[in-house]
Image (tube, rainbow, N blue to C red):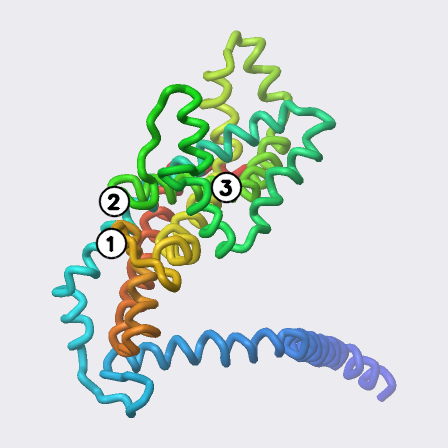
Amino acid sequence: MTGGGVKERHSAAPEVRERNRRRASRRNVGSALLFLSPWILGFLVFTAWPMIYSAYLSLTDYDVINDPNFVGFENYAQLAADPKVLLALGNTAFFTLVQVPLYIIVSLALALLLDRAGRASGFFRTVFFLPKMTPPVAVGVLFLLLFNGQNGLVNTVLGWFGIDGPAWTTDPAWVKPGLIFMSLWTVGSSVIILLAALRNVPETLYESAKLDGAGFWRTSFSITLPMISPALFFIIIVNTIAGLQTFDEAYTAFFGAGNTTYSNDAALFYVIYLFQQAFEFLNMGYASAMAWCLFLVIMIVTAIQLIVSRRFVYYEGDR
């Protein structure tokens, strides 16, 4: 009987350990959910529910004052026939397609310079990042001051070199280029990300390339760009999404109180038109439909970028 009892205890031991393991696992999950609960609650209340409700509103005629009136997909059909939607989409696409590559080029150029700055790089990192802390509304006002066609600083500097600067804020042909140049004011965060990526590139790769006689351009395209491609890809994704949602600076400069310049249509980006429909014309249903169309566009663009990245983005764990 003694031997049988020992066998039973030995056979029960794995079951006891398994129960204890499951109990500990449940406690860990419970603790994790407890710590995550403020974020989960905030996400449900301030993100998930507004998204679900806006999807419902996109199928209604709603002016905030009266109850929503269900109209089906009429708002989406109206989007396809609204000429201002096409204008806003065109302005937004132009801004994004030009601004994102230029933003990447300037950020990478500054990061390469900082990588060679030695001890002074810490000071310049701070200098480059400070403009990112500037409120977007202030940047919009600064745009009007710097790019004023009559006495703005930009045209004054161009005049020193005998160049007659354009009317950045009133000529429709120059409104978007001016906003694109102004957006370069905030490249600091991308510069810091790229600088960190550059400093993680193994020096042995450059030494081997030099032994093989590779020059600057060869090492840049064969070593530097592939090794920092994950950081570049991240910046491209983030700035593409930000470009498609451009609002603050352009709205402050061209659609603020009392601003009625004839160049407004040239700065009418998609989110600005969405904002007008929602809070100026109180067409909440139509604005909700616009928001979901923008969400779909961003999802498609991001999915295409993710597919393309499989070929061009290199990760150290890849074989």
Amino acid residing under circle 2 = Pro
Query: In x, y percent, where is residue 242?
Result: 42, 53
Disc 3 is placed on an element classified as helix
Disc 2 is placed on an element classified as helix
Q: Can you see residue 11?
A: no
Residue at figure coordinates x 36%, y 62% from the top left: 258
Amino acid residing under circle 1 = Asp
Among numbered discs 3 and 1, the one appearing first in the sequence = 3
Q: Is residue 238 above or below residue 46?
A: above
Residue at figure coordinates x 20%, y 54% from the top left: 87
Disc 3 target residue: 185
Residue at figure coordinates x 27%, y 67% from the top left: 290
Marks 3/1 in contact by CB < 8 Å: the verdict is no
Residue at the left extreme, as displayed:
81
Disc 1 target residue: 265
Which picture quadrant has residue 101?
top left
Q: Can you see residue 274?
A: yes
Residue at the front extreme, as displayed:
150
Residue at the right extreme, as displayed:
2
Disc 2 target residue: 172
